[in-house]
Image (spheres, rainbow, N blue to C red):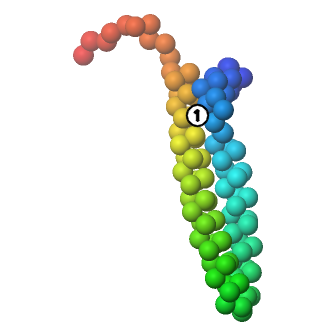
Amino acid sequence: MAANTEDAIEEFMGDNPRASEWRALRLSLTDRLKSLLRQHEQETDLGTLANLERQIHTLREQINALGTEEIVSQFVEDSVRVTIARPDLGGEEFED
């Protein structure tokens, strides 16, 4: 069933990245942000500091956007898994 589930998720997601792909991109940018923050702490030139601050701001926005995409994709993937795992009730109606 796992292969069928993953196939269904792939089909449902289409060309959209999976949550794991968004996570990898986010973590890559997070590493870059850490590097820029270390560089910012050591920099003394005001022009370079201003440039680093712009880059840091931009990276933080991108990291937040990737985090949102990751959460949305994970929700979609989990929804597909739950739908597949849900037992087929055969259209029966239940009485209270």
Residue 13 rendering spot, x and y as whole percentages: 61, 31
Residue 35 rendering spot, x and y as whole percentages: 75, 73
Q: Quadrant of the N terminus?
A: top right
Q: Quadrant of residue 49?
A: bottom right
* Residue 4 sits above or below residue 18 on the image: above
| Residue visible at 57% across and 28% down in the picture | 81
Q: Quadrant of residue 40?
A: bottom right
* Residue farthest left in this picture: 96
| Residue visible at 66% across and 32% down in the picture | 15
* Residue farthest bottom in this picture: 44
Q: Nearer the viewer, residue 5 or 53?
A: 53
Q: Is residue 35 left or right of residue 91?
A: right
Residue 93 rendering spot, x and y as whole percentages: 33, 9
Q: Nearer the viewer, residue 9 or 90?
A: 9
Q: Nearer the viewer, residue 16 or 54?
A: 54
| Residue visible at 71% across and 84% down in the picture | 48
Residue 70 rendering spot, x and y as whole percentages: 59, 47
Q: Residues within 10 Å of mark 1 (few under 14, many from 20)?
A: many
- Write down the residue under mark 1: 77
Instruction: Report the label total.
Output: 1
Q: Amino acid at mark 1?
A: Glu
* Residue 23 sits above or below residue 54 on the image: above
Determine if residue 26 is in view: yes
